[in-house]
Image: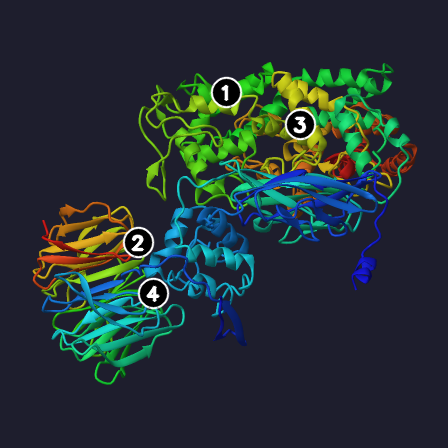
Amino acid sequence: MRTLFTLFTFAATALAAVTIPDVPPRHPVKPQISSIAWRPDGKLLALGTYKEVRLVDPATQQVVATLPGHAEQVRSVAFSADGKLLAAAGGLPARSGEVKIWDVDSRKELITIKGHSDCIYSVAFSPDGKTIATASYDKLLYLWNVADGQQVRKLKDHIDAVYALAWTPDGKRIASASADRGVKIWDATTGERLYTMSDATDGLSAIAISPDGKSVAAGGLDKTIRVWTLGDKGAKLDRTLIAHEDAILSLAFSPDGKFLVSSAADRSMKIFHADTLEEVRAFPTQSDWVQTVAFSPDGKRFAVGRFDGTLSIITGVN
Amino acid sequence: MKLFALLALPALLAADSLKVLPDSAILRGPEARHQFLAEATSSGHQEDWTKNAQWTSSNPAVATVDATGLVTPVSDGDSMITAAANGVSSSAKIHVTAAHEPFTWTFQNDVLPVMTKAGCNQGACHGALAGKNGFKLTLRGYDPAADYETLTRVSLGRRINLSDPSHSLMLLKPTMAIGHGGGQRFKPDSLEYRVISEWIAAGAPRPQDSDATVKALEVYPAAATLKPGAEQQLVVRAKYSDGNVRDVTRWVKFSSSDEGVATVDDWGHVKMNGSGEAAITLWYQSKVLYSRLNVPFDRKIDPEVYSKFDQHNYIDEFVAAKLKALHIAPSKSSDDATFLRRAYLDATGTLPTSEAVENFLADKSPDKRARLVDQLLDSDEYVDYWSYKWSDLMLVSSRKLAPKAMWSFYNWIRDSVRQDKPWNKMVNEIFTSSGDTLQNGALNYYVVHKDPIDLTENATLAFMGQRITCARCHNHPLEKWTQKQYYQMANLFSRVGLKSGAEPGDMVVYAKTSGDIDLPRLARPLPPAPLDAPSIPLDSPEDRRLPFAKWLTSPENTMFSRSIVNRVWANFLGRGLVDPVDDLRSTNPASNEELFTAVTKDFTDHNYQIKHLIRTIMTSGTYQLSAEANATNQDDNKYYSKYIVRRLPAEVILDAMSQVTSAPTRFDGYPLGTRAEQLPDVRVQSQFLTSFGRPQRILCDAAERSQAPSIAQALHVINGDTLNKKLSAPDAFPALALKLGLSDSRLLDTLFLSAYSRYPEEAEKEPMLKALEQARVNQGSSEVRADARKKAIEDMMWAMLSSKEFLFTY
């Protein structure tokens, strides 16, 4: 039996009411894994999936808890440095962004932040845990106060969707990567855009800052990994490598900063020496797009989440 | 209620016959639907009775049919679908198979066609090069694999929701459940919605290499003669590689070649608005076709008109048949003087001399027109004229060629024309030769087209009338050519080597053993293939141009023969059988397809000989029709019911002025007396030629030669140096006439004969003689008198040479 429900929306000129049929999936769906984060103690993984976060024990790969109630796909998850809080972000595509802050131990939702006019693709805690930054398809980044969910800053300079962001380890700066091909460096205190790296020739979807905070790597549709050294007034493009045969989906530095792992839309996944971009290891073709890679805090393993909903924890770098 | 509805329908005329179209169908799978048409024929025209007919199925347990002729499968088996109306009936056979088998919509054959029809991937929306609002599809779905990733995975799969399909952005947006800049493209209760939502619900299966592909389209009716104001539904079926045939009418993009005659809506429903013929073109999944619908002009024409039409060869039969079908009467035949002038200008680009006119008019033999044609085909002027024409086509000029190389190229063309080298042989020489460009002039084609992309596009246009440039960046949005075909074709020319020869301007063309052109989006080369022909292996050591040449000039490649036939035809009849002359895409039908086919076949049967083609055209009654319209063909410029009046080409006008005034044009670097039509180069300075539309030979495009009128042209004729200097030259005709002491009457005759190819009429004579008389000065020195007389002759000639009768062919 099909049920009917109605979605109301403001069209450009009038209130439109379109009745949408309810179409159930014909087969059970294994929701995609959009994002993975390791708790800093290395004993818990958070996976961003459809309408919920799954907490997984990396030792057994069993789901130990689910954190429900999210509006749609949870596209980004991040732990605070002390491992006590988890930010899970998503929202409704083309409508709104949403972040929920969870108390990890009690599995309790602390606060829900609503903002952005499109869904959020990236969320990250400041190193001191007081602030979270969000990046959205609506071209904006916001900084929010974790304690009360108040918006602190609006970072506005990108001209297309912002897919990825990262804090520098000192908490002073934020780097963002956008479909507009630019990497921007922001002053986290003032919200001022400090400078832009415009070397990419197509939209960017992934960003990673090295553990020492000195360099930033980004990749995207041009299949190329670029690594810049960050300076006060600008960055220097250090290394460039056409790393895959299709768009790069995700990038991560190993905690010791020696390696860089990347995945791409040709279902490939590779590990490179971070300082030379020399290939260390190429993995067999993956079962589907690897949308997220994350190193364990000890650097001995990394977790891989795919579009087909599969999770792998890979041991050893080379 | 039902009775009332029936009464409200238009009364049906008695029909000679009724036919269900198509006459059979196989419905495969539970989602197969098939529209049938009930097409009545009544006294020579068709009527669409689909909506008026009573539809029944002989076996409703197998298939049902609704009141509109739409058939739906129920279970496997056979049934007859019958339409009955007004005492006549007709049936179609239905076979239903796989009616209860599990069914899933496919991305490539179901979802993409829905999106294409809804316009999602059109150039103004997400099919734009930069996409729209961050969402980019390939134009009209030319790259299904890329579109699939974009829709299902890119941006973390924001556009589909596998867990909750109806909440997918790709459904919420086009239904306007949430704001959409493109407005509502389909409704939630539509089949479009069902196709996409059910595909997502099935897990959004990805396109497979094994998916059936569309091989061809068929349309019902393929042609019909209808009444003014009539409406006609079309049914389009796609034939797939797996043998399946589906009614795809709903997903076809329709357009009309002539909205004044017929308009068509998104569902293939045609309305005839006026008289004439229109092609309703169909585009589905990069396959194209058209249906030809016509409405005869609403008038009665005495059948005798057609039997009286002076028919000389098969061309006239086809023209008469078309004119008869459309109720257009042909003009009467042209008189001898008009024919003579036209024949000279069209075949040789020159005017007949006054002597030639006098002789022709005096000749009483019945075959004099045919003999004239032979005489013109044998003339040097014929060689000049057609060498110039093919030089336009092959872009001969000193822009990219050193003088010696240009001459080598030109002389090769000239020699080919002189010999009447078969067109296939001539073109073959370009694509099969290697060696020295000064020795073999044809090879300069590669010097002009050094870039393989240029070579691909220009050779395709020059020799096949196919414009494939669109396919460089994406599948042709209106045509059947795909980007893949484009780069396979381009890769045929990736190994044309050019190196310097023995002297400046000399180049050596050779076949390289390596080199490929990549298909950009795949970043790899594809096996080279001539457009729709099989490919050759990437590692084949063969000169890749050879299979191209073989395919290009083979009799099966009608694009090749039709292209040259159309160019020659347009030269004589003023409009190609397909118009524009070099736009032979399959959605641009000929104005008389049967005629075009027949002329093309005759041409290939006669060994691709241009002279045979020209002779056939020029000796036809059609070519010899008057340009004067009758009451029925004033508006006809398409079906050859009369000769089409047109301005002469730039070079022909200039040469004619030189000829009539006896004052040749001086071209820098060429001997005095060289006519414009004899120049091998278009870079020879001439303001006159430029303003009258001489092409620069940079683009391979018939439109590069401008036929547009301009102020500059008027000024050139009225005030410009060109004509006035010719008239006042010391040994020009006015001076000569004065020296010879020609009488006014003799002078007038000579001028009319040489400029207009006819004797002056009495009504013209009288005022002109009077004017000449009045211009005489009877006092003063002999010099003053001679001056006045010369001035009068110059003025009279100026008036004649600036008139339409001189500047036009008719």
The residue beneath circle 1 is: B428
Q: Residue at x 15, y 51 (%)?
A: A271
The residue beneath circle 4 is: A161
Q: Which mark is residue B64?
A: none
Determine whether label 1 and label 2 are within 8 Å by CB.
no
Query: What whole-number distance in Å separates the C-alpha atoms at marks 2 and 4?
Result: 13 Å
Residue B641 visible to the viewer: no
- Counting from the top left corner in percent of width and height, residue B468 is at 50, 39
Asked if both marks, 1 and 2, belong to the same chain, the answer given is: no
Helix, strand or loop at label 3? It is: helix
Helix, strand or loop at label 2? It is: loop
Q: B430 or B591, which is in the foreground?
A: B591
Amino acid type of the residue tagged 2 in the rendering: Leu
Asked if both marks, 2 and 4, belong to the same chain, the answer given is: yes
The residue beneath circle 3 is: B597
Amino acid type of the residue tagged 3 in the rendering: Thr
Amino acid type of the residue tagged 4 in the rendering: Ala
Seen in the picture, residue A85 relative to B578 is either above or below; the reply is: below
Asked if both marks, 3 and 4, belong to the same chain, the answer given is: no
Residue B357 figure quarter: top right
Q: Chain of mark 1?
A: B
Q: Chain of mark 3?
A: B
The residue beneath circle 2 is: A221
Q: Choose mark 1 or mark 4, whichever is in front.
A: 4
Helix, strand or loop at label 4? It is: loop
Query: What whole-number distance in Å separates the C-alpha atoms at marks 2 and 3?
Result: 50 Å
Q: Earlier in the sequence, mark 2 or mark 4?
A: 4
In the rendered view, does B448 fall on the left or right side of B740?
left
Determine whether label 1 and label 4 are within 8 Å by CB.
no
Query: What whole-number distance in Å separates the C-alpha atoms at marks 3 and 1?
Result: 23 Å
Residue B270 visible to the viewer: yes
Q: Earlier in the sequence, mark 3 or mark 1?
A: 1
